Image (cartoon, rainbow, N blue to C red):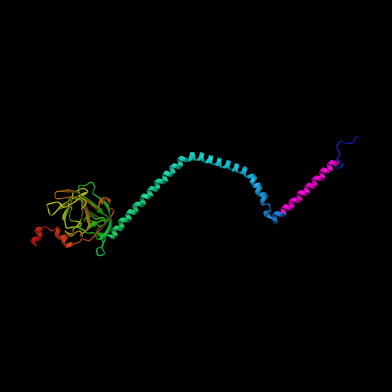
Amino acid sequence: MAPSSQRRSSYSKRAQYNLFTGYIVAGIGALIGAVLLVLSFFQPQFFGGPRSVAQDAATPATETVAAARTGSKSLWDSISGYYRAGSKNAELKREVELARIRLGEAEALRQENVRLRGLLDLQDEDRKPVAVARLVGSSSSSTRRFAYLGAGSEDGVTVGMPVRSARGVVGRILETGRTSSRVLLLTDSESVLPVRRAGDETVAFAEGRGDSLLRIKLINLGINPLKVGDMFVTSGAGGYYPPGIAVAIVTELNDDGGLARIVSDPAATDYVSVEQIFEPDAAVGATTPIEEELGD
């Protein structure tokens, strides 16, 4: 029988050397790995330099990958943002509208607090208000000028009591119910109020015209001493109103006085205070016919 052409490695010198060399290399590698492992446990900083060199070598590649990733993400965000721009815009508009509403409510609340503080500060220590309430309505469609107050006889309100705001005179109580009252405004055609010019003793009557202006009629006729911008206040005559409360400012002159704009516009007035009649006896006397007074 012929010998086999394939022989075992043990019979080849080259194969034996290659196998031996492999064992030696593997052993040296294992020894080096063991030494490095021991150094990593006991001297961690020993590998700082090689790690830095490796990191520096890999940095360009990692930066390229990171830039590509960031660029692709930005591109996707741009595309998705383009398609979502409409809904985002509508949402922002709703938020802005809501913020404006809240801002308006806050401003209205601030103005109301200012008015309330004014009502609290306008009272003297000896004159406390009978009631503080809102003007809840007005006779805008009528030729007469009335307002309706959210306080009535249950609150101590009676006919004739003056009504004022933090700015000045509004009118006086004309009729009372249990929980509401009707106020005769200064601008009513039946309203006549004794006034004087602030700063001197120029006296006059402020008569309502049925609109937003008052007719200032001087008692002493002659040369008209009034000027545009003059302030008129209550004189105290008639007994209803205490003296010194702002009434109107002159805006136009005529032969016997002028026209004046009321200081306390009821349309812009929210809270008002109802006060006691300044001089009850004088108020009763002013409404008593002269014939009846002379007869007594």
Residue 97 lies, in percent from the top left, at 39, 45
Residue drawn at 27 percent across, 51 percent down: 268
Q: Residue at x 66, y 49 (%)?
A: 51
Q: Is residue 34 magenta?
A: yes
Is 259 displayed left or right of 68 in the figure? left
x and y, in percent, of residue 279 in the image: 18, 62
Residue 69 percent location from the top left of the image: 58, 42
In-front residue for pair 161/59: 59
Image coordinates of residue 125 in percent, x first then y, are 26, 64
- Per the rendered image, the range of residues in magenta is 12-37
Q: Residue at x 49, y 40 (%)?
A: 81
Look at the magenta stretch and give its main secondary structure: helix
Residue at figure coordinates x 64%, y 46% from the top left: 56
User: Horizontal placement of 260 versus 91: left or right?
Assistant: left
Q: Nearer the viewer, residue 95 or 290?
A: 95
- In the image, 35 versus 155, the foreground residue is 35
Number of numbered discs visible in the structure rendering: 0
